[in-house]
Amino acid sequence: MKIIDKINEYKSKNQRFYSFEYFPPKTMEGVQNLYDRLGRMLLLEPLFVDITWGAGGSTSQLTLEIAETSQNICGLETMMHLTCTNMKVEEIDFALEKAKASGVRNILALRGDPPRGEEWKKIEGGFGYASDLVRYIRQKHGDHFGIAVAGYPEGHSDCTSKEDDLQHLKNKIDAGADLIITQLFYDVDMFNDFVGKCRAIGINCPIIPGIMPIHTYAGFKRMTTLSQTAVPPHILEALEPIKDNDEEVKKYGVKLCVQMCERLVEAGVDGLHFYTLNLERSVRKVLKGLNMVRPDQLARYLPWAQCASTNRL
Ligand code: FAD
């Protein structure tokens, strides 16, 4: 089923949803662990899960395989990421046909990043922007796929101005995308401001906040530097005295995430999208803290989580 239809169902019942992002692991053992994890997360009934497309198409085969397994064997509504980087139209066609044949009905259409230190270049016979990919999917496959696109509350790093970036986001919706998933952020006011600006220029689709719980101090620094995410001073102040204590950092990460999500729900978001980093303990604690998981879901899930090796959770 298309994710936008599921979101509309939830909205009509005045319910909020949650969803989880995973990336293709590097080893076969990692892939097996991910399948086990997907099986457990199914018990928490996310609206959907999504599988990333490795930078420059580096995991294309594995992304396709995991998306197929997640959709067909695990029974999770699955969205496959697809980037234009290094992809000729024939390769995009192959990926879309494979997704279609696997029953994957949802695509996150992206431009992708250039290799580190280089500028992004469209290859001959490829697409220049995510909006071109969205338009192409609609032309070629009509309404078969649900299409999501990426949004950047702080503006995308390549863009000349935030206003232009917003207009480019609108182009992606006008080209046929159904919903927006945002880059991770830690400043809720800035996200709310972004949503207001989107609405003001006529972007009326769901805008789903991308949330990443803090797991370790080093990981948090790396992620926020890579994605050029602004970190409000109160977060840095809270982390500074505990930065060498992983357990304390995780605990703080869950508390902060619950507070952020409460404010987002209050502001009226349709759902919460978690960047899980292929982990599950913090996300589960956040959902519990938000009272978003029912006791019967937890009762089914917890014995399996306890069976799994705790240091991987
Ligand atoms: P676009 O929407 O095409 O925008 C790219 C830049 O071009 C922006 O600065 C935009 O303002 C500008 N632009 C757009 N249209 C025009 C135009 N007509 N003229 C001039 N400028 C224009 N990367 C991966 O490699 N794999 C993934 O799985 C992945 N998943 C992601 C998931 C989410 C939710 C997010 C937020 C990002 C993800 N990324 C992923 C990263 C993403 O590929 C990069 O941020 C990339 O640099 C931009 O992709 P985009 O689809 O947003 O590009």
Image (spheres, grey):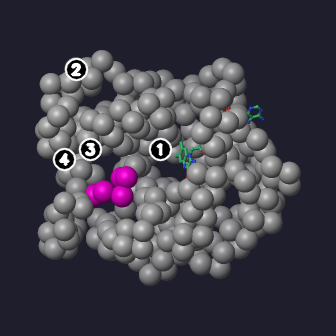
Q: Which residue is mark 2?
A: 237
Residue name at image x 20 percent, y 24 percent: 240
Query: Disc 2 vs disc 1: which is toward the camera?
Result: 2
Q: Earlier in the sequence, mark 2 or mark 4?
A: 2
What's the CA distance linking mark 2 and mark 1?
28 Å
In-image side of 178 versus 309 (left or right): right
Q: Position of residue 42 (x, y in %)?
A: 34, 70
Q: Is residue 104 visible?
A: yes
Magenta-colored span: 276-280
Please give the label number shown on residue 215.
3
Snapshot quadrant of residue 237 = top left
| Nearest the eye: 183 or 259 | 183
Please give the label number shown on residue 239.
none
| Kind of residue at disc 2 | Glu
Snapshot quadrant of residue 97 = bottom right
Residue located farthest toward the right when viewing the structure as drawn = 125
On screen, residue 130 above or below 200: below
Residue name at image x 14 percent, y 69 percent: 306
Q: Secondary structure at mark 3?
A: loop
